[in-house]
Image (cartoon, grey):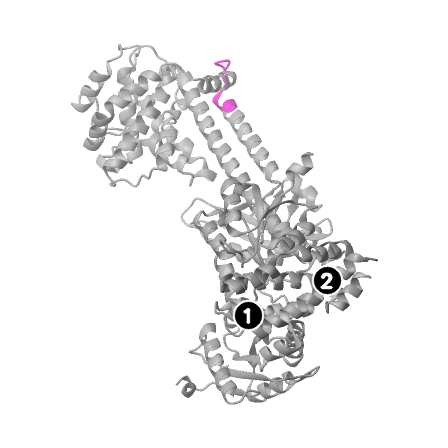
């Protein structure tokens, strides 16, 4: 029964019971099928439980609401973004098909259809969407976990500092709360500072790290019960710079906003608005706003807390002391914010007195790491590093990605254990570009172009990615290669190393290619369709702009009457015959497309004279198909340097085609501007 | 009577339908369903009421079913009728309608003959 439940669900919408039933029979083995007999019924089902379905098969002509109205409604509710729709219809008019695609249909299956094709297309579409949805889920949950994890790491770190300081543990929490309130008020008051709503939680989190530099201060000074001597005070003051340097050492994360704000806060939370603070003596808004706010929060909480040398002041007194300048000098705007938010802050801090469960848990972690005072800072750092590494490996395992590191100066490539095993190469490879086994397994596609890529990198844009095929167990699979370059930290930076990962994207890549191939091909003749032709031409033009091109458009004379007299099946036969003749009479680098009912397009690439080529192709297209005397009418335009827009060329060729039609069919004409009248 | 014989009687393309649906059981099932479909009656009723929209839809449905079942002859006449009715005007459709009538009756007669005495 479990399998029954995990079947993907499909909604079939068609007013003909027989049509629904044929589709249902084809699909019921593998999918859960629900049927709706018109657009209105379909919309009712979708409104109620649209998210259950993985795919909709939709007819166009139906009573009450037709297929286009269903698509329109799905656009309005944005359901179309998550739920793929395949149109199944007897409509063959290009305008109708075009409209369906414009309204967001994923695919279009014409009646009469072939069971295996329907099956295959349904599978492909569902597969592609499911894959995409899963990837989005994975990424979201990773981001969430990562955020939770960094928040916890910050709490652990700051608690270590507090522990060593002999502080209550609440100080950090208070500073964070006050910072949050002041910042929110500030961004509503002014846009003077480049702080967005999204930065607020990051700055608040970073505020917890303001005193991490105290790890580097001698225990004896840090925990001295009495007043500090001038020398001791001078040592104590170095904690802001020590903290900044610790963060500066996190080289790989230096663009991380959390690290960036934490750096500002550590280094400058003892600066003063009047310029008399330390370590740099910055003045006014030279001090980053993050540090200004944390500084104010730090002072407020120190005043309202008990210290060995003073009793706690009441919140009102603390506020007065700050506003009147008795304790530090601050940005007048921030003083306004403090006055405005005072009630909220007092309220929030009084509720913070008891620690919540999460915080207790964190305290336990930190206490475990610090269970004896004798543990040295370096040991703690190693523990934390270990924890980070474990965390990283865990995430990497989840996504089955392969990490690597390439040291440029030593010319050594290191692969993660999983990667080495997967590709059957050693974990460490010296001179990878020339190592024979590595080269045949991975080298040509991945490393062959590395030096070219590297020469294009700059410190401002250190990341690049490309897709390539790599050999895994005798089979070529598509991989996404994502790399990041690190640079030396001197005046003229050079590339130090490359880190990155390889992600297997083979299945998605192949499914995407197949779908794309289908979307640009006409299913009846296998020629390109109009969209495909437009894209191919644009590609040709950008690759070989110096070549000569001509665009020809033709249609089959009296095709409608051939259809009427001999039937649609014969009509299809004629269309296939024309495409055969077309393929045989043109050359490989010419481009042939069926762009509408009986309308075809050719783009010729030629050297000297297009006229004999056109004459020859035209002649070979005409000739009997069974009893039908097949002739075509054709319009041709030569491409000039000025005129390279596909739509315009197409229009001109069409004008010429129209002229030859009017002149009695079975002929071709070259476009002249006089035809426009 | 075999399904193939039934198809040749109603001027359909048996090879085509079996190629697409892949199973004789399915073809048989839908063949019989065709008899139960009300679109043909709806077509005449709508024309009688002067409802061009509904008539177009009914003709379109018949055409779609015929495509599914490879009823070549009826599909051709239903298709011609559909195109005449598409514009929403009830003019000049009569010759197409009588062609549909003729093909439909032959089709139904063939299916009934098969239903009475099916063999495989």
Quarter of the picture containing the N terminus of chain B is bottom right
Residue highlighted by disc 1: B83
Which label lies toward us, 1 or 2? Answer: 1
A472 up-or-down from B7: above or below: above
Circle 2 marks a residue in which chain?
B
Which residue occupies the extreme front position in the image? B48
B86 up-or-down from A66: above or below: below
Residue A193: quarter of image:
top left
Magenta stretch mostly in which secondary structure? loop
Residue A95 location in percent, x, y? 50, 66
Residue A162: quarter of image:
top left
Residue A24 location in percent, x, y? 66, 50
- Residue at 58%, 70% in the rendered image: B81
Q: Can residue B76 be seen in this view?
A: yes
What SS does tag 1 mark?
A: helix
Disc 1 or 2, which lies upstream in sequence?
A: 2
Q: Is residue A645 visible?
A: no
A410 or A49: nearer the viewer? A49
A233 or A327: nearer the viewer? A327
Residue A512: assigned label: none
Which segment did they paint magenta? Answer: A370-380
Query: Few, some or many C-alpha atoms within 10 Å of disc 2 (few <14, some 14-19, many ≥20)?
Result: many
Q: How far apart are marks 1 and 2 (CA)?
A: 24 Å
Quarter of the picture containing the C terminus of chain B is bottom right
On screen, residue A440 versus residue A385, left or right, reads: right
Residue A552 location in percent, x, y? 54, 80
Residue highlighted by disc 2: B17
A389 or A38: nearer the viewer? A38
What SS does tag 2 mark?
A: helix
- Residue at 37%, 21% in the rendered image: A173
Circle 1 marks a residue in which chain?
B
B10 up-or-down from A609: above or below: above
């Amino acid at each position: 029964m479990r399998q029954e439940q995990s079947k993907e669900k499909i909604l079939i919408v068609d007013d003909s019971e027989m049509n629904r039933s044929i589709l249902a029979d084809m699909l019921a083995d593998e999918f859960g099928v629900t049927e709706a007999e018109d657009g209105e019924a379909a919309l009712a089902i979708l409104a109620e439980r649209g998210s259950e379905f993985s795919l909709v098969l939709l007819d166009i002509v139906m009573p009450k609401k037709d297929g286009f109205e269903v698509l329109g409604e799905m656009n309005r509710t944005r359901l179309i973004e998550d739920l793929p729709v395949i149109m199944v219809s007897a409509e063959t008019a290009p305008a109708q098909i075009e409209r369906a695609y414009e309204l967001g249909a994923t695919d279009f299956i014409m009646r009469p259809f072939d069971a295996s094709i329907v099956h295959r297309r349904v599978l492909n579409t569902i597969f592609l969407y499911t894959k995409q949805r899963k990837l989005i889920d994975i990424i979201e949950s990773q981001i969430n976990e990562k955020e939770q994890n960094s928040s916890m790491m910050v709490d652990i770190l700051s608690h270590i500092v507090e522990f060593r300081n002999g502080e209550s543990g609440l100080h950090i929490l208070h500073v964070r709360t006050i910072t949050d309130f002041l910042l929110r008020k500030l961004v509503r008051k002014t846009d003077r500072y480049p702080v967005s709503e999204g930065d607020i939680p990051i700055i608040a989190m970073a505020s917890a790290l303001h005193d991490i530099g105290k790890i580097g201060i001698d225990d004896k000074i840090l925990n001295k019960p009495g007043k500090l001597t001038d020398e001791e005070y001078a040592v104590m003051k170095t904690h802001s710079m020590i903290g900044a340097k610790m963060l500066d050492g996190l080289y790989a994360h230096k663009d991380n906003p959390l690290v960036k704000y934490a750096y500002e806060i550590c280094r400058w939370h003892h600066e003063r608005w009047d310029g008399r603070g330390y370590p740099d003596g910055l003045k006014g808004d030279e001090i980053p706003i993050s540090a200004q706010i944390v500084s104010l929060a730090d002072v407020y909480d120190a005043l309202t807390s008990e210290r060995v040398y003073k009793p706690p002041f009441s919140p009102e007194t603390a506020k007065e002391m700050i506003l009147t300048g008795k304790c530090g000098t601050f940005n007048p705007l921030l003083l306004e914010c403090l006055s405005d938010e005072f009630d909220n802050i007092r309220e929030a801090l009084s509720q913070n007195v008891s620690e919540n469960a999460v915080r207790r848990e964190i305290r336990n972690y930190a206490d475990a790491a610090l269970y004896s005072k004798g543990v040295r800072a370096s040991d703690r750092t190693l523990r934390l590093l270990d924890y980070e590494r474990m965390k990283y490996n865990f995430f990497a395992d989840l996504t089955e990605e392969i990490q690597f590191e390439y040291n440029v100066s030593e010319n050594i490539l290191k692969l993660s254990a999983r990667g080495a095993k997967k590709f059957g190469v050693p974990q460490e490879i010296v001179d990878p570009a020339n190592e024979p086994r590595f080269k045949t397994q991975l080298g040509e596609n991945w490393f062959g172009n590395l030096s070219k890529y590297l020469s294009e990198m700059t410190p401002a844009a250190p990341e690049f990615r490309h897709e390539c095929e790599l050999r895994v167990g005798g089979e070529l699979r598509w991989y996404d290669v994502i790399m990041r370059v690190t640079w030396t930290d001197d005046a003229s930076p050079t590339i130090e190393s490359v880190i990155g990962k390889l992600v297997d994207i083979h299945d998605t890549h192949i499914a995407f290619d197949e779908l794309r191939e289908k979307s640009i091909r006409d299913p009846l003749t296998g020629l390109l369709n109009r969209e495909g032709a437009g894209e191919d031409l644009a590609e040709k033009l950008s690759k070989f702009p110096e070549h000569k091109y001509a665009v020809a458009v033709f249609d089959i004379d009296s095709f409608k009457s051939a259809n009427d007299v001999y039937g649609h099946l014969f009509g299809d036969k004629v269309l296939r015959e024309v495409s055969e003749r077309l393929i045989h009479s043109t050359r490989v680098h010419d481009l042939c497309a069926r762009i509408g009912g009986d309308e075809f397009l050719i783009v010729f690439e030629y050297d000297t004279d297009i006229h004999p080529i056109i004459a020859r192709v035209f002649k070979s297209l005409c000739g009997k198909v069974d009893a039908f005397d097949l002739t075509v009418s054709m319009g041709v335009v030569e491409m000039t340097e000025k005129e390279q827009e596909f739509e315009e060329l197409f229009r001109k060729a069409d004008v010429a085609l129209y002229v030859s039609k009017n002149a009695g069919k079975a002929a071709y004409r070259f476009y002249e501007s006089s035809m426009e009248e | 009577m075999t399904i193939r014989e039934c198809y040749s009687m109603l001027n359909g393309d048996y090879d085509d339908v079996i190629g697409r649906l892949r199973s004789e059981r399915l073809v048989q099932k839908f063949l019989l369903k065709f008899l139960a479909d009300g679109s043909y009656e709806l077509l005449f009723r709508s024309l009688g009421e002067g409802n061009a929209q509904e008539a177009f839809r009914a003709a379109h449905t018949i055409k779609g079913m015929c495509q599914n079942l490879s009823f070549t002859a009826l599909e051709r006449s239903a298709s011609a009728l559909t195109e005449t009715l598409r514009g929403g005007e009830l003019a000049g459709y009569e010759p197409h309608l009588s062609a549909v009538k003729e093909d439909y009756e032959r089709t139904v007669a063939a299916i009934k003959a098969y239903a009475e005495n099916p063999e495989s």
